[in-house]
């Protein structure tokens, strides 16, 4: 009788790295306990060229100027705009300055209770329009390219429809235009449209829409993936480069700003409930906002995996404007990752190159 020798276990068991695990867990706990100082954001060299109330117009000079037409960024009123210059090496603004563009960014600032009466009309005519005029004067350019991201794209589109300034190119990315399409919970949308949920009463109590409310609103939409970033952090907390990038994004996601009460009422009622922009019923200080007035070259960018602004919410822009030169791009990204991948500046450059006038070379 022969005895069968047991086979050796050939399954690969990972070795336990005590140093790595200690570093991973201790770094994770330090971050979650808020024991580390705030990460640095906004790395690209800049200078303030105009201020109004809490707002600042920032100028980011091209590393080596290649184009005559400067870029003017308009960001959302919900968040701070430093996501456009978040990580060195993949920053939108840094990438564009390296590609030869002068860049301007209108930072709306952080409104206080005393600013509760600032309306969309005020933001568009007293801040954005005047900011564009200041950028044109500062740059000496004859034309300008306006780039709106998220709600900044909505604001930029409204402005472009009534602008007197020479807008050569209009670019809107992940932009809400048709508010009949919503990513918010159905009950919220139904209640607001039926008048069961009264935004005006809420604003009367608080003056401005508090950041905590704004944060809760976005969390409700992204609830299924709310914990995903923390799982990623725990998994890679030993990787210094990953942690630094994670902390910058985490800082941005938590730093919502108050939304002025009057502007929020207009956003919720005129746009969200009544969809006046698409219907051609919106007015800004008596001026009718007709998107058909837009004749600038147009680029509309949407993200395939955007759970906040669905593609269907942006697409009507292509039909509503009168621009002869219109381009639509659907990219493999999410609402936030579009700004972080480092690919967005390349996409913009490919489209802008022939529409930005090369700087005349002097002998």
Image: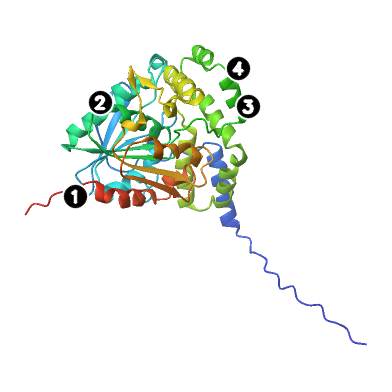
**Eyeballing the image, is 136 above or below 340?**
above
Say if mark 4 contacts mark 3, CB within 8 Å: no
Earlier sequence position, callout 2 versus callout 1: 2
Earlier sequence position, callout 4 versus callout 3: 3
Label 4's element? loop
Q: At 63% from the left edge and 60% from the top edge, which residue is drawn?
A: 16
Earlier sequence position, callout 4 versus callout 2: 2
Query: Image quarter for residue 93?
Result: top left
Q: Is residue 80 visible?
A: no
Image spot of residue 326 (x, y percent): 34, 44
Q: At 88% from the left edge and 83% from the top edge, which residue is drawn?
A: 3
Q: Which residue is mark 1?
A: 358
Q: Which residue is mark 4?
A: 196
Q: Which residue is mark 3?
A: 187
Within 10 angstroms of label 2, few (less than 14), some, or many (20 or more) residues? some
Foreground: disc 4 or disc 2: 4
* Residue sitting nearer the eye, 46 or 261: 261
Image spot of residue 271 (x, y percent): 46, 25
Q: Quadrant of the C terminus?
A: bottom left
**Eyeballing the image, is 69 above or below 138?**
below
Q: At 57% from the left edge and 33% from the top edge, which residue is drawn?
A: 219
Say if mark 3 contacts mark 1, CB within 8 Å: no
**Eyeballing the image, is 121 above or below 102?**
above
Left or right: residue 19 compared with residue 13 = left
Q: Which residue is mark 2?
A: 130
Within 10 angstroms of label 3, few (less than 14), some, or many (20 or more) residues? few
Q: CA distance from mark 4 to mark 3?
A: 10 Å
Label 2's element? helix
Image spot of residue 297 (x, y percent): 30, 42
Q: At 89% from the left edge and 87% from the top edge, which residue is drawn?
A: 2
Say if mark 2 contacts mark 1, CB within 8 Å: no
């Amino acid at each position: 009788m022969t005895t069968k020798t047991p086979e050796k276990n050939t399954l690969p068991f990972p070795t336990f790295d005590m140093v790595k695990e200690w570093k991973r867990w201790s770094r994770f706990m330090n971050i979650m306990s808020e024991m580390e100082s705030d990460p640095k954001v906004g790395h690209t060299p800049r200078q303030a060229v105009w201020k109004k109330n809490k707002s600042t117009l920032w100028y980011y000079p091209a590393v080596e100027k290649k184009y005559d037409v400067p870029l003017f960024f308009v960001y959302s009123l919900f968040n701070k705009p430093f996501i456009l210059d978040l990580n060195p090496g993949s920053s939108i603004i840094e990438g564009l300055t390296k590609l030869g563009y002068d860049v301007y960014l209108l930072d709306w600032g952080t409104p206080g209770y005393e600013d509760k009466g600032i309306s969309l009309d005020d933001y568009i005519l007293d801040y954005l329009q005047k900011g564009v005029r200041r950028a044109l004067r500062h740059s000496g350019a004859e034309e300008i390219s306006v780039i709106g991201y998220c709600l900044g794209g909505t604001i930029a589109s409204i402005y472009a429809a009534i602008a007197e300034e020479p807008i050569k190119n209009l670019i809107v990315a992940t932009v809400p235009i048709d508010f009949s399409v919503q990513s918010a919970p159905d009950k919220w949308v139904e209640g607001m449209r039926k008048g069961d949920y009264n935004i005006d009463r809420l604003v009367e109590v608080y003056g401005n829409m508090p950041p905590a409310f704004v944060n809760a609103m976005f969390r409700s939409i992204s609830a299924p993936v709310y914990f995903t970033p923390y799982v990623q952090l725990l998994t890679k907390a030993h990787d210094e480069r990953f942690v630094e990038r994670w902390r910058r994004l985490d800082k941005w996601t938590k730093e919502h700003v108050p939304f002025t009460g009057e502007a929020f009422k207009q956003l919720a009622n005129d746009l969200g409930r009544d969809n006046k922009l698409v219907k051609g019923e919106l007015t800004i200080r008596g001026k009718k906002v007709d998107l058909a007035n837009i004749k600038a070259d147009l680029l509309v960018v949407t993200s395939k995996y955007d759970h906040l602004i669905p593609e269907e919410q942006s697409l009507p822009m292509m039909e509503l404007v009168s621009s002869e030169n219109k381009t639509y791009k659907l990219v493999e990204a999410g609402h936030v990752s579009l700004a972080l991948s480092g690919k967005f500046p390349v996409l913009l450059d490919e489209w802008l190159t022939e529409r930005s006038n090369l700087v005349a070379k002097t002998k």
